[in-house]
Amino acid sequence: MSFEVPSPYVWDDSFRVAYDNLDSEHQALFKCIAKCAENRADAAALADLVKVTVDHFADEERMMAKTNFSGLPEHNKIHSEFVAKIKSLSAPLDDATVAFAKQWLVNHIKGIDFKYKGNL
């Protein structure tokens, strides 16, 4: 499934998962990806994206574990694959990589994260 990537690339209420901390973290992820897109040669921006992503995934998975959310194993696998992908990147980022990251986050929130709305 593929959802429309917003332009400009910013978080809006259509991405709300109804948990303030996770919504804030999703907003930060949008900002990190946008910064990487604008500054493709900036290794620090890429490192920040990795850190923010890893921290967010840990928070999200902790919340899922606390409520015994049934989708946690699948969610964890998806998170691990994305982290491995972005950790393997190096600046400068090419167009395809930026497009992938933008689309991945949009699809992940709307197609995967929305499954836990109201369940954590």
Image (cartoon, rainbow, N blue to C red):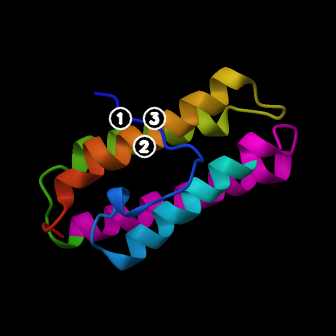
Crowdedness of circle 3 by 10 Å Cα count: few (<14), some, many (20+)? Answer: few
Q: What kind of element bears circle 2?
A: helix
Which residue is drawn at the image coordinates 65% and 27% (left, top)?
A: 97
**Residue 98 appears in which quarter of the rendering?**
top right
**Mark pair 3, 1: CA separation:** 20 Å
Q: Which residues are magenta?
A: 36-65
Q: Position of residue 54 (x, y in %)?
A: 54, 56
Do callouts 2 and 1 mark residues in contact (Cβ within 8 Å)? yes
**Residue 100 appears in which quarter of the rendering?**
top right
Q: Looking at this view, is 13 or 80 the one in front? A: 13
Residue placed under numbered mark 2 in the picture: 106
Q: Looking at this view, is 29 or 47 the one in front? A: 29
> Looking at the rendered structure, which numbered label has been put on residue 3?
1
Tag 1: amino acid: Phe
**Mark pair 2, 1: CA separation:** 7 Å
Q: Looking at this view, is 8 or 60 the one in front? A: 8
Disc number lying in front (3 or 2): 2
Q: Vertically, is 120 above or below 51?
A: below
